[in-house]
Amino acid sequence: MVGTNAAGCRLGVLAFGDSITNGGGELQWGVALQSWALWVARGTGLPFTSYAVDGATAANVVEEQIPAFESQSATPDGRYELGCLYIGVNDVRMPDWDPLAYERDYRIAVRLLAERCDRVLTVTAPLDLGRPRAGAKVADLNEIIHRVAHEYGALVLDLQDFRARNLLMPDHVHPTAFGQIAIAERALAALKRNGVSVRVDPRSLIWFETTWMVRLRSDLTFAYRHTKVSSRASWVVLKARTASLLRR
């Protein structure tokens, strides 16, 4: 019966995370910006449930998203085929990045998903993250993700090399509409290697057309926004360095 949780029934995809997993934003050549995890659900033909919230950190997942899942779910004891977790981008970009606190909260989230899902898919962050760049801290973040995922038998979707003008917005943090699809395609490939049935390629579900004028306008808009972001980032770095020198 639809809506029940009979023995052996699974409820689809369960996702926690920040704005990248929450999705939403500007159209890209008429294609809606949807969550990579939603595209994964569509690619596998599974129902989708997300508690991701814009601006979230690992602590927010533990303190807000997991309690929301436990209190708001119509099937609180249900099991899911797949749990998706992409969190840490906001943590590692903070000036007071605390890897120990992050690892503590990340482990809680992965453990919860491992207990409630047949498979868990975790995601690392691009090394060229943010403007100003998060820098070497991203490698530390990704090492934690790999280590905790290994402890709980979770799959790891490696996005360390994820970068391209049409896949990331000028802030070098948020994926574009096509970026979300590209992440989903990588995720589906990893899941397929792990025995998951992939029913449809997300790219086959979209339609768009463009002209040289549309592409030119898009390129000029990106260049303008990228210049603004980079200039602001340079000012932030200069200001921080100046303050550091004055404190000596």
Image (cartoon, helix red, strand yellow):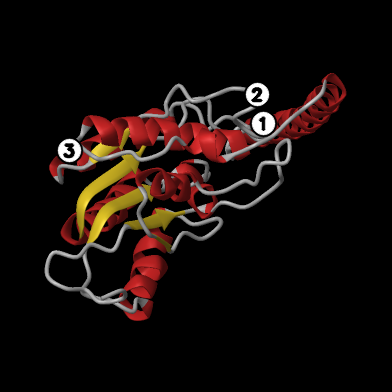
Q: Quadrant of the C terminus?
A: top right
Name above or below for residue 205 compared with residue 104: above
> Which residue carries the number 3 mark?
150
Amino acid type indicated by mark 3: His
Query: Of marks 3 and 1, which one's residue comes earlier in the chain?
Result: 3
> Which residue carries the number 1 mark?
237
> Which residue carries the number 2 mark?
165
What residue appears at the point 56 percent right and 48 percent down from the top-left corner?
A: 34
Q: Nearer the viewer, mark 3 or mark 2?
A: 2
Name above or below for residue 196 compared with residue 77: above
Residue 143 seen in this snapshot: no
- Is residue 41 left or right of 121 when viewed as pictured? right
What residue appears at the point 27 percent right and 40 percent down from the top-left corner?
A: 197
Q: Quadrant of residue 173?
A: top right
Q: Quadrant of residue 155?
A: top left
Q: Nearer the viewer, mark 3 or mark 1?
A: 3
Q: Tell me the element at label 1.
A: helix
